[in-house]
Image: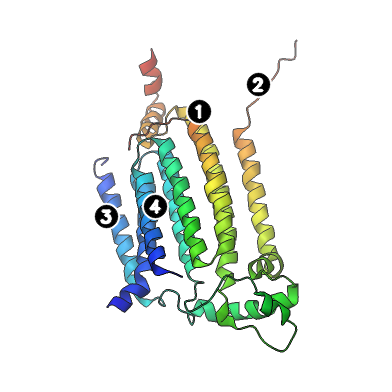
Amino acid sequence: MTEYFLAKYNFWIYVVLMMIGLYAMMGKRNLVKKLIGMNIFQTSIILLFVSAGVKKGGATVPILRHSDYGSVHAEHLIRVADYLNPLPHVLMLTAIVVSIATTGVALATLILIYKRYNTLEEDEIMAIRKDIRSYKTPRILRSKD
Amino acid sequence: MRKWFKPISLATVILTGMLLIYGTHDMPSWGDPNSPANRHISPRYITEATRKTATPNIVSAVLGDYRSYDTLGESAVIFTASISCLFLLRRIRRQRNHDD
Amino acid sequence: MIWQLDIVLLIFIVICAIAAINIKDLMGAVIILGAYSFFMCLLWTEMGAVDVAFTEAAVGAGISTVLFIAAVNKTARRSKD
C-alpha cells in the first residue's frame, strides 16, 4: 500500500492542480480569474509531461558529462540509464512558449472587453448584452444619468 | 440557474478529477526507468545526439537539430500571436476630413 | 531526486494555486501566480529538467507576470469572486 502511494502520489497532486485550474475556468465569474485558472491548468499538464521523463536511480540532467563527451566517437557507448529522457523536455519547451502566446492574446482581448463594457465580470457583461439585444438602454448608461 | 452554476461546476470538476485519479491506476509508476516513454526513442537521442550534432546538451541538440521544424512552427505561433496583439491593441485612427 | 523536497514543493504549489484563485484583489492574485511559477521552476530543477526550468523562470514567471500586471493596471483591480 505504501509502495503504491509512493509510486502514484505525484500524479494525484497533478490531478488536484488540474482540478483547481478547471474550477477557476468554470466557476469563477471574473475573466482575469479565468485566465489565471487557464495558466494553472496549462502548467499542470506540462508538469505531467515533464514527469514522464524522470528516471529514478542515479539519472542526471540530459547534458553529457565530460568523460562521456571524450568517448563519443569511440566504440564505448553512453549508458542510457545515466541520463534523463530529453524528449518530454523538448516538447514542453515548445508548450510553455505557446502558452505565453495564448496568454498574451487573451489579455489583449480582455483590455478590449473592458474598454467596451467597462467591467470584467461575466454576469454583468451578459446583462448588458441582454439589454442591448432587447433595445433597452444598457445598465451602465442608465446608472450614470 | 445562476445560483446553481457554482455547485454544478464544482461537481463536474470533482467528477473529472475522480475519473483521472482512477485512470492513474494503469499508468507506470512515477520515475520508472523502464516505462514506455523512456524506452522508445529517447535511448537513440541520448546515445547518438552528441555524435551527430556535436552538442553536449541533448535537449538543445534535439530542439534545434532533430526537431527544428517544430521550433520553426513555434516561432510562427509567436509571430502570429504578436501580430494579432498588435492589431487588437492598435488605436483606431479617426478618418480625417478632406476639407481641411 | 529527493522525495521530501519534492513533496514540500508540491504542497507549496497547491497552496499558491488555491490562494491565486481565491484572492479578491486581482493584483495580489497575479503576484501569487508569479510565485506559483517560481515554485514550479524549482520543482522542475529538482526533477532534472533544467532547460524547462529556466524557460519557465524567464517566460512563465517573468513575461507572463509583466503582461498580467499591465493588463490589470489598464482594467479593474477588484473582482467580485
Question: Which residue is located at x 37 percent, y 75 percent?
Answer: A7
Identify residue type, mark 1: Lys
Distance from Cα at disc 3 to Cα at disc 4: 14 Å
Whether callout 2 and callout 4 share a subunit is answered no
Chain letter of mark 2 equals: B
Q: Which residue is denoted by mark 2 in the rendering?
A: B94
Question: Which residue is located at x 58 percent, y 56 percent?
Answer: C54
Colouring of the image: rainbow
Identify residue type, mark 4: Gly
Circle 3 residues within 10 Å: few <14, some 14–19, many ≥20: few
Q: What SS does tag 4 mark? A: helix
Task: Pick whichever, A63 or B7, lies toward us.
Answer: A63
Q: Horizontal and vertical percent for residue A17?
A: 38, 57
The disc at residue B11 is 3
Chain letter of mark 1 equals: A
Q: Horizontal and vertical percent for residue C39?
A: 45, 54
Residue A136 visible in the picture:
no
The disc at residue A115 is 1
**Relative to A124, is B58 above or below?**
below
Labels 1 and 3 touching (C-beta < 8 A)? no
Task: Give the residue at the far bottom of this rendering.
Answer: A75
Q: Which residue is denoted by mark 4 in the rendering?
A: A21
Q: What SS does tag 1 mark? A: helix
Chain letter of mark 4 equals: A
Q: Quadrant of residue B58?
A: bottom right
